[in-house]
Image: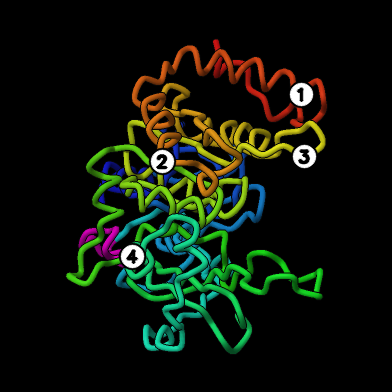
Amino acid sequence: MTSEKIKDVLQKLGYKLTDFGNHWRTNALYRGGKNLTALQIYKNSGVWVDYVNNSQHLPLKSLIEATLQTNDSAEVNKLLDGYDFDSLSSTIEVTETKPRIEMEKTYPDSILEKLLPHYKFYNDRGVGDHTLRFFKCGLATQGSMYQRFVFPIYNSIGQIHGFSGRDMLKNSTNKDRPKWKHSGKKSTWIYPYYIADGAGNFPIQDEILKKQDVILVESIGDLLRLHDRGFKNVLCVFGTSVSNSLACHLMSLGLKRVILSLNNDYDKKKNRGEIGSLKSYLKLLSFFDKDKLILHPPTSSDFGEMQDEEFEIWNDKLLNFDVDSGNKDNHKKILQLIDSKDIATSSYKKKYFS
């Protein structure tokens, strides 16, 4: 394996490499690290060492497995494109110890047969049956997701590796019952990128790659409403913080634009959605140039509350978005949030706005 091939594999994983002669330095994406020199990777072999987490030299394969959070050889070999790890030569002694990798639990598609196609809740919120059937969701009447409208989460090889359920119990006496309940390792979800249609195609994946941009929203409810309105290039953040897995995945796609459209909600004079958006914006600046990032919240508190004409207004503004003006506006808002201590000063890099 040549150094160029090793470099190509690392960049596909989302690593931004800095040249240090016979090796590269970068941050440890597999554990969410931000230190840009913590990870050292040798060009001739791919052998790597994480100076923050441990001092052992490990084979490149273990870094791929840790970053993808899998030890599925088929998935690893797909990224390697036929290159054999056993043929890697190195002058550095490689230890046998590997980073601890947790195997995720997966479920057969047959489990979805237990979900009832009772769509009234989302129909009343402007989402059609065709959209809900595409997402393979339904009402659970038993188990840990009892009386929740459940959405299966698929991984990159078409397996269900999690569920997200929206509470359907109105006027519940249990005040501790959360609106949304998630089962699985949410930090690894890229939803709904890997959902296939009846013909085995991946419409959302295809649309994102075709348009070369993606819209990030806070919840599945926002996603459904946008999808039903014809916006297929939408992914769900599941909250107000973009995960490392999602950020790395987006970076690997070579997108021209990443549009942050988290909720526009206020609580005691603070817009929690905007604060979350700006924090995610700062995080994504480690992966993308600022000219590729757009903050464009819904016109109402969320997309579920928007009327038809509001979608047209929102889309028109997006089509005519002035990135330079938007960056200046973000700069002002970030400074205000630093003053109010809603964002730590250390999170803000002025060089991004020079």
Which of the two discs, 4 and 3, labels the residue nearer the N terminus? 4
Report the amino acid beneath label 2: Asp
Q: Position of residue 314 (x, y in %)?
A: 43, 31
Which of the two discs, 3 and 2, labels the residue nearer the N terminus? 3
- What residue is pinned by disc 3? 267
The crowding category of the residue bearing disc 4, from other C-alpha atoms within 10 Å (few below 14, some 14 to 19, many at least 20), is many
Q: Taking 172 as reference, is 199 left or right?
A: left
The numbered dot on residue 338 is 1
- Magenta span covers which residues? 76-87
Report the amino acid beneath label 3: Asp
Nearer to us of marks 1 and 2 is 2
Residue 328: tell me if it is visible.
yes
Please determine whether, in this image, residue 85 is positioned above or below residue 338.
below
Nearer to us of marks 1 and 4 is 4
CA distance for labels 4 and 3: 34 Å
Question: Residue at left 59%, top 89%?
Answer: 142
Residue 208 quadrant: top left
